[in-house]
Structures are given as C-alpha cells and as structure tokens.
Image (cartoon, grey):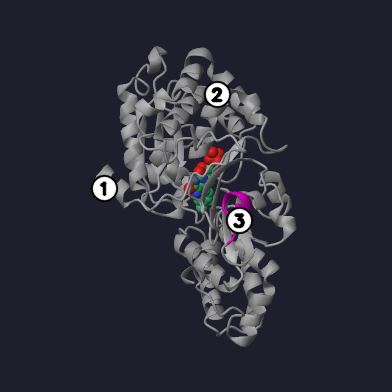
C-alpha cells in the first residue's frame, strides 16, 4: 500500500481536539496537513532542541535537565525518565542502544499512533536527544505492526533527517553519530513489554526475559540499552526547548508536565487530548470529550490493564496523576480512559477483556498460560452463557488471587487487576448472572445500540 493509499484509507480523525485553556506541545501539529515533512517541522522550530542539546549541553547536563523536569515514563509504569537515563554505565567504546517502544497494543491506548503518522520528526528529535544524553550508538524504533502509515511516515522522516545531516555520522558537525532503524512488530501485546520487545528485535520469540539483569546493564545483544515510550521521548524535546522549570511548572506534586490522555467508549468526542497532569477525569470526559452519550456506570482510567472505577463523583473528580490513581487502587497506565455504559453487562465486558489477555498470554509461565490463558476465559464463558453457579464467583476470586503477583511478567496482573476491580464494584451483576442464568442488562451489545 502506498503512503497515499494508506492516508486515503485512514478513518475520519478522532483526535487532537485542543482546548485553549491548556498549552498543547506534543500534539500541536497532529491533524495538520503536511506536518510530517522535514520542511514543515524545521520551519516550525523543529530540531532546535536537538541542536541546543548537541551543541550547547553536555550529555550529563541533558540528563540533569530531564531529571529536574520531573518527567515520568509515559509507557505505563511512570518511572522517572532522567533517572532511568542516568542508570546507563559510562560509554566503553562498544555499542549501546536506545529503543523506542511504539508497540502500543493495549486496548484503549492510541496516543503514540498519531505522532508517528502526523509528527514523525518530533520523535526522531526526541530519539536524538535521548541518544545524545546516554551516548547511544544506535537506535531501534519498534512500531506496532498494524501501524502501516506510521511506519512509512517514520521511515520517510528518518531518511529525510539522515539526508539533512541530523542522523548518521557526525550529526550537525558535533562529532556525535547516531542512526535509527525501524522495526515492525509482529502483532502481539507482549511485544510491548520491554524485555520481550528486545527478544523480538533480536529475532527471537517475544517472551519476556528475567530481570535482573536490567536493560541498562545488559539489554539488546547483551549491551547497555534504554527503552522509552514514544511520548517520553517527545516530551524530552519540549523539556530541552523550554527548560525543566517550564515542564515542572505544570502538573501535581508527583506528576509533571502535560500528558496525552485518550478517551473511548460512548462519549461525544472520542480522541486524544493533551492536558497537564492532574487535570481531572471529569474535565476530560465532560469538557473535552463532550460527556457520555449513554448513561454511564464505570470507567477504566488508563488502558485496559488498569482497574476500573464506578461512575461516582469522588472518582470523576480525581486528578489524573500517578500518585492519586495508585492511592485509589488503580494506575494511570497509558492514560487511556474507557467509558462503560450502564447497559453493558460488566461480566460480559470482562469476558471480552479476559479473552484479549488469554489470546495475548505468551505461555512462558504457568500462572499466565493456565490461569489467564485457560481458566479465566472458561469461567467467564460459563457465566455469560448462563451456566454459572453462585459458587463460581468464589472460585473466580480464588483463581484470580492465585495468579496475581505470581506470573513472570506484568501481563497476567494486567488482566487480574480489572477482574478484581469489577468484582469489587459490580459483584451484584456477577451474583445476579450466576443465580438467574441471564444478565441484569438486556442490551449487551451497546456499541450496536
Ligand atoms: C504486556 C505489556 C505491554 C506493554 N506495552 C507497552 C507499549 O506498547 N508501549 C510502551 O511504551 N510500553 C509498554 N509497556 C511498558 C514497557 O515494558 C516499558 O516499561 C516502557 O516501554 C518504558 O518506557 P518509559 O520508561 O518511557 O515509560 C508494556 C508493558 C507490559 C507488561
């Protein structure tokens, strides 16, 4: 498929609705015609941050600036980016790698996609800055296989940057050399887990690796490696451009800067919204996304792996930051909010989610392979098909608690957290279904309503 054909096939954009109350940085040019070219990017201040870093700052100064900004990794776990960068051992003349994680396979998460498609040079610039800070010799960009247009745009941007002396040998005449290769993922959620991703890049099956050793000590090909999310790297561009104080001036005590929040489900304007950390769910759902189009009963706060909340003021008014979500028994994750309408049977919703995790379990460890891969989907299938018994709920709880914390990587817990949260908040729906053989809610297929 040509770049043009892929653009034509692209569904109507659902993204990048800006609200004048907040400064938009990473998503400035998303949705803008022609923004993916080097000419556009440069004529709008592009590559100035890379120039500033490479010509005016030492690598250690770049790391200190990112540390001072309070930027936390946007891939889900929220580990401080500058601290992660400082874990890399000093260069020893041998290869060291920067890996950008653009696998983005978690349901509800779609913020990275539009940077790859509409503002690819921003990511190239972020990778140059990260690579310079850690003195990397080579970069890999691991893109979700389905992101065809994003891949072609990234490849074109890298080629343009290389031709302009922004990648390759002796970048901007500074003596620093770095280049990037693009690798398309094969279509599995586990490929986004950083150690499985490295296996995949090395041509192996994407099973997670044991940690330690951590990637900073022994990553790609056994060499020091740092893996960062797309928007951790693009955030760094603006930290360098505008300074750590500017970034740290937005957000809450433990979460700084802006973040790309995504919203899907029955709301008026699904999409990606750039907001400062600490804006509330209510602002995102009502002010930005226009509010629910069906009576809601719950929302998932940060992508399918994060435990849901019932539709109550105390949760809607929570600031969307790492600390608040953790204190309330969930996670900010990728910031992908999913609204669940009242008429959707929660058990059926979880069956859908559990089947995803069962399909994506890599099979390496027993709790995930047998528990997530077989037990959970079968138990849910029994319940939703009306064959459940009241005692099945206790069994479901027991299976879930035996999986939790016992798997090799976080994929299994990413399934169990939502299962347990649904049991905590909507146990009545499970009980009704098990006792009556049918759901409380007739209209299960809300998306067809
Ligand atoms: C099953 C699974 C899937 C993941 N998928 C992604 C992903 O698609 N993109 C991403 O950036 N991080 C993903 N992560 C998190 C990565 O392992 C890693 O923490 C992240 O890329 C680090 O980048 P950051 O420090 O910039 O956040 C995933 C983790 C797990 C357990």
* Residue 240 image label: 2
Q: Which residue occupies the extreme left position in the image?
A: 2
- Give the magenta range: 285-292
**x, y percentage for residue 411?**
54, 56
Q: Residues within 10 Å of mark 1 (few under 14, many from 20)?
A: few
SS under mark 2:
helix
In front of the other: 63 or 44: 44
**x, y percentage for residue 294?**
58, 66
In front of the other: 148 or 94: 148
Q: Which residue is mark 1?
A: 5
Residue at the image point whose x is 67% and y is 54% from the top? 330
* Quarter occupied by residue 102: top left
| Distance from the alpha carbon under mark 2 to that under mark 1 | 36 Å
SS under mark 3:
loop
Q: Earlier in the sequence, mark 1 or mark 3?
A: 1
**x, y percentage for residue 184?**
35, 45
Say whether residue 92 is visible: no
Residue 291 is one of the magenta-drawn residues:
yes
Say whether residue 84 is visible: yes
* Residue 47 image label: none
- Contact (Cβ within 8 Å) of mark 3 with mark 2: no
* Quarter occupied by residue 181: top left
Q: Residues within 10 Å of mark 2 (few under 14, many from 20)?
A: many
Asked if 140 appears above or below 175 in the picture, the reply is below
Mark 2 or 1: in front is 1
Mark 3 or 2: in front is 2
In front of the other: 1 or 99: 1
* Residue 306 image label: 3
Residue at the image point whose x is 64% and y is 85% from the top? 435
């Amino acid at each position: 498929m040509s770049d043009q054909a892929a653009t034509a096939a692209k569904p109507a954009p659902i993204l990048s609705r800006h609200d004048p109350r907040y400064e938009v940085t990473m998503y400035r040019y998303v949705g803008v015609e022609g923004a993916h070219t080097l000419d556009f990017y440069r004529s709008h201040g592009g590559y100035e941050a890379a120039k500033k870093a490479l010509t005016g700052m030492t690598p250690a100064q770049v790391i200190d600036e990112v540390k001072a900004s309070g930027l936390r990794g946007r891939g889900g776990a929220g580990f401080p980016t500058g601290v992660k960068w400082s874990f890399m051992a000093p260069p020893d003349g041998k290869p060291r790698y920067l890996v950008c994680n653009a696998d983005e396979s978690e349901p509800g998460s779609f913020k990275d996609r539009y940077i790859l498609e509409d503002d690819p040079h921003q990511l190239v610039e972020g990778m140059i800055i990260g690579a310079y800070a850690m003195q990397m010799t080579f970069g890999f960009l691991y893109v979700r296989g389905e992101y065809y247009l994003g891949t072609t745009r990234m490849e074109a941007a890298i080629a343009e940057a290389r031709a302009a002396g922004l990648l390759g040998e002796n970048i901007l005449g500074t003596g620093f050399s770095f280049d990037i290769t693009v690798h398309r993922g094969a279509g599995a959620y586990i490929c986004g887990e950083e150690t499985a991703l490295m296996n995949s890049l090395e041509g192996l099956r994407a099973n997670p690796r044991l940690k330690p050793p951590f990637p900073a000590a022994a990553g790609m090909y056994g060499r020091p490696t740092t893996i960062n999310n797309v928007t951790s790297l693009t955030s760094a561009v603006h930290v360098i451009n505008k300074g750590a104080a500017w970034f740290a001036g937005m957000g809450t005590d433990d979460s700084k800067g802006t973040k790309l929040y995504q919203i899907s489900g029955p709301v008026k304007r699904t999409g990606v919204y750039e907001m400062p950390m600490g804006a509330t769910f209510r602002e995102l759902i009502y002010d930005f996304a226009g509010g629910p189009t069906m009576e809601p009963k719950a929302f998932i706060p940060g992508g399918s792996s994060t435990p849901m909340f019932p539709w109550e003021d105390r949760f809607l008014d929570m600031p969307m930051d790492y600390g608040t979500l953790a204190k309330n028994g969930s996670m900010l994750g990728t910031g992908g909010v999913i609204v669940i309408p009242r008429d959707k049977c929660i058990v059926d919703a979880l069956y859908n989610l559990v089947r995803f995790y069962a399909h994506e379990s890599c099979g390496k460890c027993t709790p995930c392979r047998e528990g997530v891969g077989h037990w959970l989907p079968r138990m849910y299938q029994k319940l939703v098909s009306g064959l459940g018994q009241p005692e099945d709920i206790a069994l479901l709880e027991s299976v879930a608690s035996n999986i939790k914390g016992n798997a090799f990587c976080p994929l299994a817990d990413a399934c169990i957290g939502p299962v347990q949260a649904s049991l905590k908040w909507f146990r009545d729906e499970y009980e009704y279904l098990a006792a009556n053989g049918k759901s409380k809610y007739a209209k299960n297929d809300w998306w067809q309503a």
